[in-house]
Amino acid sequence: MVMSMGLFCSAQAAEGLWLPEQQPDWPIQPHGSAVLKVGGCTGTFVSPDGLVLTNHHCILDLLQYRSTLENNYLSLGFLAINRELELLAPPDFTVSQTLERTDVTGQVLQGVSDRTTGSARFNLIARNRNEILRQCETERDVSCRVVEHYDGQGYLLVRDQNFAQVKLVWAPPVNVGHFGGLEDNWQWPRHSADLALLRVYNADGSVYTPSHWLPLSPAAPADGEPVYVAGFPGITQRYRLQQEADMAFNEFYPNLIQYSERWLALIQTAMENNPDIALRYIPTLVRQGNRLQNLVGMLAAVDKYGASDLLAAQERELRDWIATTPDKDRFNTALRQTESALEFRQATLQRQLWWNFFQELQLPLVAQRLYRLAEESERADANRTRGFQVQQVPAIRSQLISQVRQFAPEVEIKLLVELLMLYQELPEAQRIPFIETFFGLDSSSTRESILQRVQVIYTNTALGDSAVVEALMKTSLADFRRNSDPWIQFAVMSAEQRLQWDLQERELRGLEQQGRSVLMEAFRRHARSKGARLPDNANRTFRLSAGHVAAEQTGVTTSEANAQDTLDNEVLAEHQAPAARTTLKTLLAIAGTEDRYELPFNMHAAVAVHGAGCLAESAEQLTLNFLSTADGTGGSSGSPTVNKRGELIGLVFDSTTDAILSDWHFDESRHRLIHADVRYILWLLRYVYQAHELMAELGFEENADGCSLNGQPIIPRPARVDDFHQDREE
C-alpha cells in the first residue's frame, strides 16, 4: 500500500490551474492516481480498500436513483454498516482514474493549415480526433478523451479507467450535507457537511486496491497555512474579448436568470407537500438553484469590481502589444475571425438559450436520444458516433431511466407551458418553425390554448414508462419513424432542422478554433514579454493549484485599521470580514434560527454527549469549513485539499460570491474557495453514526491515551503555521 505523502514546498498563492506537466512551483505533487473524476466533480481515494471521498452534492443523482418514498436517502442519509449493504450506483454514474496523458497536438492538427477554416477545419480536426480515440479505446472499462489546451494551441489525449462498479457507503441527510439550503450557495460563512463516501470495485466484484491514496491530516488547517488543490475544474474563460464578456454580462446572464427564476419557482411550488415530486425533482431543484445563485452572484461581482472595465483594459493592452509585433497582421486576422463568430452567436443567442432550456425537459430529450440511438444502430459499430457504440448502450439505458425517474407530468407540463410563453417573446428572426408547427403556436396563442395542447401531448405519450423506453431502445429506425407517440413524432419532425443547426455549429466552431488559438498565442507571448507564465483555462482535465488559508478581504482590514490608528474596536469589528474557519460552535449558534438551519436530533444528541470528542479541545476548536485563496471554479467540487505534507485537510465544495468572477478574471484578493474540513466527517462518523469500521479504515484509532490518525496523535486545535506537525521529519 502506498500513501501520497510527498513533501510540498511553500508557494505563494497565485492564479493558475496548472497541468502536472507544467511543473508548478512545488517540487512534489499529489499523485494523480489518488485523484478521481466523480461524475462531473472530483474525489479522492482515502483508504487502500477503494474508499473514495467526494462531495454530497456530487452524488445527488445517485441518491435520488436509489431512493424510494419509504427509504429516502436524500432526507434520511445513508450508512452501510458493512460492505454487503453498500448501494450499487447506476451504470451512468461514473468514477474514473486518469491513467495517462499524451501530447497529440501534431496528430490532431495533421493536415490543418491557416487556409483551413470554418466547418472544413472543424471536420478535419474531428476526424483526426476520432481516429486517435478509435486506436486508444481498445480495452474494457477504458475511455479516452482528446482535449484542447490553450484554445487549440495544443491537444492532450487523456486515457481514463472507468471503475466497473461504484457503491455508496455513506452520505449525510440533505439538511446536513446542504446545511443552509440553496440560499447559502456561494455564501460565507458556511457549515456544510458536503461530504460523501463511495467505494469502487473491479469487474469481478473484488475491492479495487489503489496504488496511492491520501491520508487524513491529524491537524486542522491554520490561518495562513499553505494548501494545495488537485482536481478536475470545469470551464473558465479568462482570456476573452470584451465583446464576449459584454454579451454574457448584458444579455446572456440576465436572460438566463429570468428563465431560471421562473422554472425554480414552479419546481419549488410543485414540491411543496408532495413527497413524490420532491424526491423526483430535488436534483433538478439543486442544479437550477445553484445556477441561479451563481448567475446573480456573477452579475453582482461584475458590478462590484467593474469587470467590464478590467477586461477592456486587458484587451487594450493586448491590442497595443499586437501593434508592435511582426505578426500583427496574423493576430489582427484572428481578432476579426473571433469577432465575426461572436456577432453570429449574439444574433442567435436568445434562440439558443430557449432551446437549451427546452432540452432540460425530460421527455423531449428522451425522445431525441432514442431517435439518435435508432439512427446510430443502423450503422456498423465502428462507424457509430462516439457515445452510441454498443459498449455505451447500457449507460444510455441508465441515463434514460434516470430521466424518467426524475419526471412528473404535472411538473413538466407547467415548465413547458412557461417555456412556450417565453418563446412568444423571442425576436421574429430567432423563432423556430418546427416548434410553432408542433405546438400550434401563432399570434393568437394564449396560456390557456398552449396548456390545452401540452396536456394532450402528455396524455398521449408513453415515454414516462421506463418499460416503454427500454423497448424503444431496440426499435428499428423505420418502426421508430412510424411510432405515433407525440414526443417521438417531435423527434422525427425536428431531426432535419437540428441537423442543420449542427452543421451551422460546426462552421462557427471552426472559425472560433482558428481565431482563438491564434489569439491565445498572442496572450501567451504578451505574458512572456512581461516575464510571466500564462496558465491555461480550465477544461475538466487534471489540474493543480496552490494558495493559503485566508479570510475574505472585505471592508476595513486589520492592517488598514492599524495604519490609520483611528478606528475604535466597535467600528473595526463591524467592518472586519468573517473568520477563515467555521466551527462546531458557530454551527450550534445558528442551528434552529431558521427552518433551513435545522439539524437532526442525532447531531444535537452527539454534541450533548460528546461535544467535540477527541477531535478538538472544544466545539470552538472543531473546524467544519474553511476558506483558501487556491484557484478553482465549477467542477472543482470534491477536489482534495492537502497541506505541505500531502495530508488531506479537506475537500473543495463551493466558492464565495466574489470568487465567481474568477471564471472571467482572477484576482487573489477577492478569490476564495470554500472547503469542508475532514474533521467534520470524522466527527459525524465517530459521534453521530458510530461507524467504527469506517473510522478504522480511515486510519482513526482511539484508546485511553487519546485519538490518532495513521499513527499520528490528533492535534485538538487549529495549529499555528509554524507548528511542528507541518515540518516534522519523517
Image: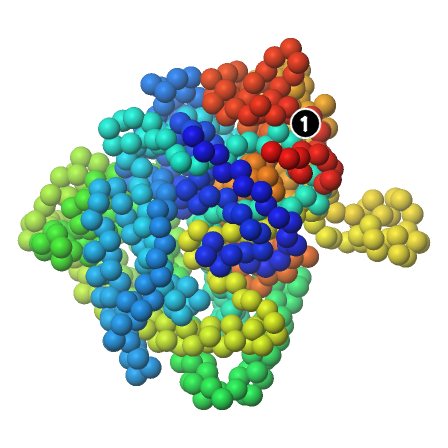
Where does residue 166 sit, x and y in percent of width and height? 34, 32
> Looking at the picture, which amino acid does disc 1 mark?
Ile
Lateral position of residue 348 relative to residue 651, left or right: left
Query: 643 or 444, which is in the foreground?
Result: 643
Label 1, residues with CA under 10 Å away: few <14, some 14-19, many ≥20: some
Where does residue 520 sit, x and y in percent of width and height? 47, 72
Report the quarter where the C terminus lies. Answer: top right
In the image, residue 518 above or below residue 50: below
Lateral position of residue 454 relative to residue 546, left or right: left
Q: Residue at x 83, y 44 (%)?
A: 573
The residue that disc 1 covers is 715
Q: Is residue 4 visible?
A: yes
Query: 518 or 673, which is in the foreground?
Result: 518
Q: Residue at x 13, y 58 (%)?
A: 383
Query: 173 or 468, which is in the foreground?
Result: 173
In the image as oriented, which residue stretches furthest toward the top?
704
Q: Residue at x 21, y 56 (%)?
A: 135
Q: Residue at x 55, y 36 (%)?
A: 648
Question: Toward which corner of the image does residue 435 lie, by quadrant?
Answer: bottom left
